[in-house]
Amino acid sequence: MILDSETKAVELPEDHGNELRLWLRLLTCTTLIEGEVRSRLRERFDVTLPRFDLMAQLDKVPDGMTLSDVSKRMMVSNGNVTGLVERLVESGHLDRRTSDSDRRVQVIRLTRIGRAEFRKMAAEHEAWIADLFSELGEKDVRELMRLLAKTKASAQKSAQARAV
Amino acid sequence: MILDSETKAVELPEDHGNELRLWLRLLTCTTLIEGEVRSRLRERFDVTLPRFDLMAQLDKVPDGMTLSDVSKRMMVSNGNVTGLVERLVESGHLDRRTSDSDRRVQVIRLTRIGRAEFRKMAAEHEAWIADLFSELGEKDVRELMRLLAKTKASAQKSAQARAV
DNA sequence: CCGAATTATTTGAAGGTCAAAACAACTGCC
DNA sequence: GGCAGTTGTTTTGACCTTCAAATAATTCGG
């Protein structure tokens, strides 16, 4: 009954099937695109998506960032970043140094080589994304941007509420 | 110039910034919600998201599915499913038997306990999702569904084209 | 200046992920 | 029947990921 969903007075489980279907579709889209990007990165540049993402964060800031900053930006755990950085320093893409002002802090930056490699990858990456979304018109893109912004805000609010 | 994007006659890199921003926003939304679901599942039921997802697939089919079916549905690799199933059989949530007609094939089903546990989790899960999307109106949901369907089709087409 | 609380990072254990190779069982062709 | 190719599953090895505990360095109140 329409009344129920308006009054919220019912104890019976409400129907949230639409939201669930929406979530599954959102997840499917993301998984599909992410998998595609992942495999193109591997195929074309022999690089993993997490490494690419990390380098993308660093490309934006010439002077580097701390590990904590990176982990916040990438929305992954601290421990995760430690290992990722480890391997990228090893391979010569990243430069890591202890901060002068705070000896707990590690500042990482792209090396010259790392930056050059990233720029090459990023250019192709951008073209892949454009191609993956190419059936969407300009208006679709705008509308999706708007709705996803709203979705993000909604999810953040809900997550925030739980975190007390 | 507008002409450029119409004629496609240019060699210069086009601006695909909008698609890229859209992709990043899509990814952010998904990561945010997925992380939230993941941590609620762990907190509330001490179960991982992949296990929940696998059980969700199986809940739909009383007679079970083969491992290949599962891996296609979940869009993950075969080897991945093997390990996942291993642990769920171990914990008593899944029943696994070799097919009579084809001895290569493993058919897995939820056990009575597995099904009961899943149903409990699924009910809460659905409520979480509804809450995470609660700021979206009915119209927003419909519109997002439509645009994501279009996005999925676009991505599939692009992926298909690459696969030759 | 000292100790407590805070903050940044690392480590370790458990699990999830993929690609590629290995294995096993089926199907079809001769 | 038997070999060749195909298909379903498992294994392997490398990497990614998280959480929680441990370490290390800073800050702050007294």
Image (cartoon, coloured by chain):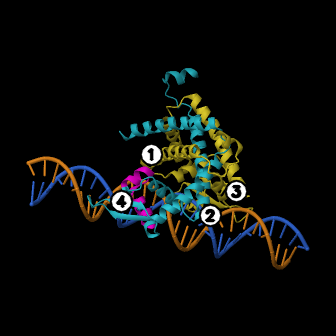
Chain colours: A yellow, B cyan, C orange, D blue
Q: Which residues are magenta?
A: B68-87
| Subunit bearing disc 1 | A
| Subunit bearing disc 2 | B
- Mark pair 4, 3: CA separation: 39 Å
Mark 1 residue type: Arg
Mark 2 residue type: Glu
Residue B29 x/y as whole percent = 61, 46
Find disc 2 in the rendering and name its residue: B43
At horizontal 49% and vertical 52% (from top left) the residue drawn is: A48
Foreground mark, 4 or 2, reads 4
Find disc 3 in the rendering and name its residue: A162
Dividing the picture into quadrants, the one containing residue B81 is bottom left
Image height of B129 relative to B45, above or below: above
- Mark pair 1, 4: CA separation: 33 Å
- Mark pair 3, 1: CA separation: 38 Å
Mark 4 residue type: Val
At horizontal 58% and vertical 64% (from top left) the residue drawn is: B45
Foreground mark, 1 or 2, reads 2
- Element under label 4? strand
